């Protein structure tokens, strides 16, 4: 019978309503089905062409579904279907105005310096700015504006930093000379990274746009929940690594959820690579260089 056909006894035929408990059970079974068979029927496999992109995906233990999500996001930004996006398209997606700071961030992503980002470079950003800690973002800002690479920022560089990060509208009380005096602990007329951290602690609005940019990038790639799961996986893997180091390489005991989760495909069997994630962090690189 077609749509709207009458059932015996009168009335338009409607599917019977399911009890709430049944809906929850169906959701659980759907997760089992997708986890077990989704790899075969979940859609076209996304192929990464460059070693750097494959290493980033491996480091974050990205699933095929996550890569497909990223591909869809990328294609949404790539309005002209050219296979690459320029800085205007990228920051329009993020809702950010172009500035020297956003240009610096784009250069971080644009590995080959072509002025555009292809899909592999788009994946690479996940292991860089999207995974940066607060200290990493501060280090990225500090290093970018430490033009002469002296390890300190002078008044001219500090003024440029505040104006650029805030798009020519620095949110800082008083004048910059007074700010230098306020935080220059050793009275050398310069701000080192430790003093720079103190500025952020006392006046977080100065560098807030740099942190907002990371949040927007995360929402427009894997979403808040996706990044939450990745960060939880990193913490768990670090705990596992610490356990193995203390117990001669022996794996820690698995919980019942982990055992059955892996059996039914509810848990990502891939492992994040903490060492590769740490290697991409500027704060870690700076400490190793000290």
Image (cartoon, grey):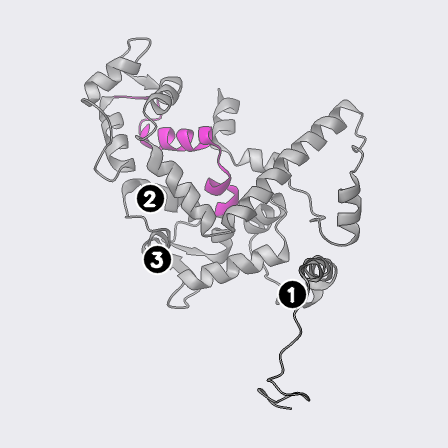
Per the image, label 1 sits on a secondary structure element best described as loop
Q: Which residue is painted at 21% across and 38% down in the image?
A: 168
- How many numbered circles does the render carry? 3
Q: Residues within 10 Å of mark 2 (few under 14, many from 20)?
A: some
Query: Which residue is disc 1 drawn over?
Result: 42
Q: Residues within 10 Å of mark 3 (few under 14, many from 20)?
A: some
Q: Position of residue 99 (x, y in %)?
A: 27, 44
Task: Give yes or no for contact between labels 1 and 2 (Cβ–Cβ under 8 Å).
Answer: no
Query: Which residue is disc 2 drawn over?
Result: 102
153 left or right of 118?
Answer: left
State the mark number for residue 154: none
Q: Where is residue 108 in the image (x, y as percent from the top left)?
A: 42, 43
Q: Position of residue 131 (x, y in %)?
A: 51, 39
18 left or right of 54?
Answer: right
Viewer-side residue, 169 vs 250: 169
Per the image, label 3 sits on a secondary structure element best described as helix
On screen, 44 above or below 173? below
Is residue 211 at least partly visible in the picture?
yes
Quadrant where the N terminus is found in the figure: bottom right
Q: Does residue 121 belong to the magenta stretch?
A: no
Give the Cα distance between marks 1 and 2: 35 Å
Predominant SS along the magenta part: helix
Viewer-side residue, 115 vs 179: 179
Q: Which segment is the magenta one? A: 125-154
Give the Cα distance between marks 2 and 3: 12 Å
Viewer-side residue, 137 vs 27: 27
């Amino acid at each position: 019978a077609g749509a709207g056909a009458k059932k015996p006894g009168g009335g338009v035929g409607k599917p019977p309503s399911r009890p709430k408990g049944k809906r929850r059970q169906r959701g659980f079974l759907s997760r089992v089905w997708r986890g077990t068979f989704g790899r075969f029927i979940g859609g076209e496999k996304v192929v990464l062409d460059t070693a750097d992109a494959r290493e980033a995906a491996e480091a974050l233990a990205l699933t095929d579904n996550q890569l497909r999500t990223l591909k869809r996001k990328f294609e949404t930004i790539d309005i002209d279907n050219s296979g690459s996006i320029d800085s205007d398209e990228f920051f329009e997606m993020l809702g950010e105005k172009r500035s020297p700071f956003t240009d610096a961030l784009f250069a971080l992503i644009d590995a080959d310096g072509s002025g555009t980002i292809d899909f592999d470079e788009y994946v690479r950003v996940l292991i860089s700015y999207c995974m940066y800690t607060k200290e990493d973002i501060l280090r990225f800002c500090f290093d970018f504006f430490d033009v002469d690479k002296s390890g300190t920022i002078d008044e001219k560089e500090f003024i440029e930093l505040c104006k650029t990060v805030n798009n020519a509208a620095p949110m800082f009380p008083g004048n910059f000379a007074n700010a230098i005096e306020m935080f220059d602990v050793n009275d050398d007329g310069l701000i080192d990274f430790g003093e720079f951290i103190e500025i952020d602690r006392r006046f977080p609005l100065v560098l807030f746009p740099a942190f907002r940019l990371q949040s927007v990038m995360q929402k427009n790639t894997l979403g808040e929940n996706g990044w939450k799961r990745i960060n939880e996986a990193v913490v768990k893997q670090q705990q596992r690594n610490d356990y193995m180091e203390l117990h001669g390489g022996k794996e820690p005991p698995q919980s019942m959820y982990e055992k059955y989760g892996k059996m039914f495909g509810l848990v990502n069997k891939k492992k994040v690579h903490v060492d590769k994630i740490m290697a991409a962090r500027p704060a870690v690189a700076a400490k190793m260089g000290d």
